[in-house]
Amino acid sequence: MKKIVSIVASIFFLISLNVNAEEKLTIEKQLVGIVGAISGTVKTETRELKAGDKIYLNETIYAAAGSGTQILLLDQSTFTIGEDSEVVMDTFVFDPATNDGKIVASVKQGSLKVISGLISKKNPDSLTVEVPEGTLGSRGTEFQTIVSKGKTDTLLIGPGKNNTLGMRPGAVLVGNNFGKTLLDNPYSMTSMTKGKAPGQAKKITKNQLKKFNKKMKSLRVAKLSPDETKSERKKIRKQLKKELKSLGFEKEEIKSIIKENIKKDKEKKVVIKKERAEKKKKAKAEKAKKKKAKATENKKGKKKKAKAKNKKGKKKKAKAEKKKGKKKKVTKKKETKKKATKKKATKKKATKKKATKKKATKKKPAKKKKAVKKKPAKKKKAVKKKPKKKKKVVKKKPKKKVKKKVAKKRKVVKKRKAAKKKKAKKKRRKKK
């Protein structure tokens, strides 16, 4: 009996161990998605990945330098992992009957691009990506994040609020304990650092966009590489179909899902192209406005310069005229002085001529002395006295007249200068 009981107990123990082992395997080996495309060396903790390999819950995916991979999740979401990246699928719950579920992934370093699927379509707040500085809450959209040392940059790709296809506008809520920032405009981005709230949403620049695209460059090369044949792609599609069948989807439903995904991709591309075209048009319009504004400013500047030149020219002319007036006055003064000196010279010449005449008169009576000595002696005295008196009168009168005239002219000039200064002061006061 004891042997029978021990045997039964051992059987129950083995059964319980098998059940526990199966439960652990199902938990550890919970399928999340399939590797759709791969480039370079991409590994997990236990194996190196290839196109078509299955991805399980809590597996850490390592992409080396110049490598990348694209994982197709069971809810039709796509996770594209860039080079030098480390990504873990922490939570994946999906009910294909109702499309209810939850996805939580964490990016420790590198870059991750997310295109949301059925889970976030049903509930936009059900997909989150954890980064060292905070969390990224996807609301039914396409976005990309780059995690570097002490900093995380997040870019919203689309679709926008005013898309023409009536699609739900995408958004990403970037937040941590210090604050939150909502990205709701396509190609807007924000940065988040440790111990600080995320920065304000800003339009991405060309250099920043190049940085985001560079992280996914290796995977683009993989898609276009000749090594990846059509047969390999067909295999991946077959595996996806098998997984969808195992979840309870029928053939028609699988086809419709795939077609819907293809349509969505095309629609997104059309929306992105339209948005880019609109942006280009707006940029051109802004450039045209700026050119017009510059042209008007240049015209105004030219007019101002012309006015300033005219003013300067007028001022220069006025100054030149003033200088000319002053020079004329000086020249007039000089001319008057010269005339006065000429008059003096002429008067002196006249006096000299008179003096010469007097000498002539002196010489004539000298001949008569021999004949009559007494009579001409008396005449000499009379002749000598008369011219001396005339000389004194001639010298004194012209000097006084010239001095008086010069004094009068100086007074007149001073009065004119004073009047001009008063007028100039009045004009300056009026201008002020």
Image (cartoon, grey):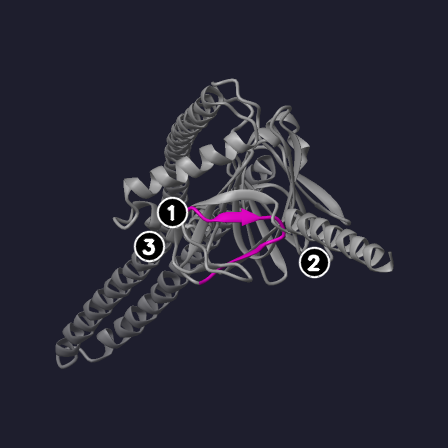
Query: Splitting the image into 4 quarters, where does residue 334 fall?
Result: bottom left
Q: Secondary structure at mark 2?
A: loop
Residue at 30% x, 72% y is 384
What is the number of the mark on residue 194?
2
Q: Which residue is tagged 3?
A: 331
Does any portion of residue 326 appear in the rendered image?
A: no
Residue 358 placed where, x, y %?
Answer: 22, 69
Q: Are marks 1 and 2 in contact (CB under 8 Å)?
A: no
Q: Quadrant of the N terminus?
A: bottom right
Question: Badge 3: few (under 14), some or many (20 or more) residues near its Cα, within 10 Å?
Answer: few
Residue 62 is one of the magenta-drawn residues? yes
Question: Badge 1: few (under 14), some or many (20 or more) residues near its Cα, within 10 Å?
Answer: few
Query: Splitting the image into 4 quarters, where does residue 337 fall?
Result: bottom left
Report the amino acid beneath label 1.
Lys
Q: Which residue is tagged 1?
A: 316
The residue range painted magenta reads: 52-64
Q: Is residue 152 left or right of residue 416?
A: right
Which tag, 1 or 2, sits closer to the chain's start? Answer: 2
Of tags 3 and 1, the one toward the viewer is 1
User: Gap in Å between the C-alphas at discs 3 and 2?
Assistant: 87 Å
Q: Is residue 194 left or right of residue 303?
A: right
Report the amino acid beneath label 2.
Lys
